[in-house]
Image (cartoon, rainbow, N blue to C red):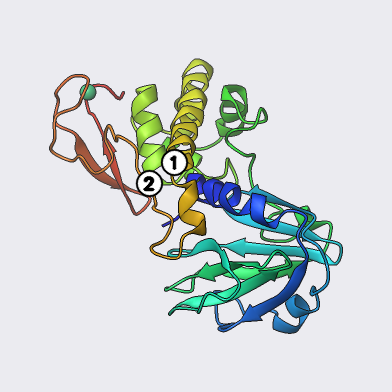
Amino acid sequence: MPELPEVETTLRGIEPHARGQLIENIVVRNAGLRWPVPVPELQALAGLTVDHLERRAKYILLHTAQGVILLHLGMSGSMRVLPANTPPQKHDHIDIVLGSGDLIRLNDPRRFGCCLLLQPPVQQHKLLANLGPEPLSTAFDGDYLFERSRAKKTPVKNFIMNGNTVVGVGNIYASESLFGAGIRPSTQAAKISRARYHVLADKIKAVLAKAIEAGGTTLNDFTQTDGKPGYFTQELQVYGRQGEPCNRCSTSIKSVVIGQRNTFFCPSCQK
Ligand SMILES: [Zn+2]
């Protein structure tokens, strides 16, 4: 599933090709994504320009003078920039045809993604209104986590994976950053000290930044017809390593289910 680093890499891959470009046409081959694609409204954007692009959580937003195209990659989606005459393949549901002779193509086999048209102020749209801060922004730090967690009896892993707390901390990144901070994933969020939250916030930022950096090496994939942008991995310390020795202390990595998600930790390094 595309996580925040993959979405950020997708944005960086398509942005140089789309920013400032005329929208010639928007082709919708399958409007049956997670929510119905508003075909006439999107097609009415023909003749406008993509003024700028941004990412918010795992949404990509394309700003025009008549509304904002909001895209989400769902479970299995990807976007590429291709010459406009490239024949569509299976699951190529939407093309944004640009004046440059390229198109942005959305492929999504499982169709959990979405493509909607939002009107300003888009921050108040129900999909965006309750999102927590961006993990790599200055608004997100240890003080924020500490203050936000005081009444939270939920496990800290659920707390940091909740998009209302902070966006983009998926299961892998939660497990890895908690290992980095030496915090047991099942610990009640309210029982963790300010100092430990400072370490945790720094680890979350570091884990995500490293993944985005790894994605930078795949930017060329966004303009290639063969294959999809690779969903990259980094060297994992605990995630998926149940029964293997901890890289720090050699204790066997344990796996438990927390919040219906597989959770990996070192019982010796994480208290
Ligand atoms: Zn260990």
Quadrant that contains the N terminus: bottom left
Q: Earlier in the sequence, mark 1 or mark 2?
A: 1
Q: Amino acid at mark 1?
A: Thr
- Find numbered disc 1 in the image and state the secondary structure of the residue it sits on: loop
From the image, tell me which residue sits under label 2.
Answer: 232
Residue 227 in percent (x, y) is at: 38, 62
Residue 127 - label: none
Instruction: Find residue 157 and report its image quarter.
Output: top left
Q: 263 or 231, which lies in front?
A: 231
Q: Cα distance, mark 1 to mark 2?
A: 9 Å
* Farthest residue, direction right: 65
Number of marks in the image? 2
Judged left or right of residue 5, residue 17 is right
Q: Is residue 117 above or below residue 52?
A: below
Classify residue 47 by image quadrant: bottom right
Q: In the visual, does 270 lie left or right of 13?
A: left
Q: Are marks 1 and 2 in contact (CB under 8 Å)?
A: yes
Q: Secondary structure at mark 2?
A: loop
> Residue at left 64%, top 80%?
27
Above-or-below relation of 137 to 9 = above
Taking the view exactly as shown, the residue that stands out farthest to the top is: 195
In this figure, which residue is indicated by the disc labeled 1?
217
Relative to 54, say whether 238 is above or below: above
Q: Position of residue 49 (x, y in %)?
A: 81, 62
Query: In the rendered view, does 225 fall on the left or right side of 53?
Result: left
Q: Quadrant of residue 138?
A: top right
Query: Who is closer to the viewer here, 257 or 11?
Result: 11
Residue 197 appears in the picture as rendered: yes
Q: In the rendered image, is residue 155 in sight?
A: no
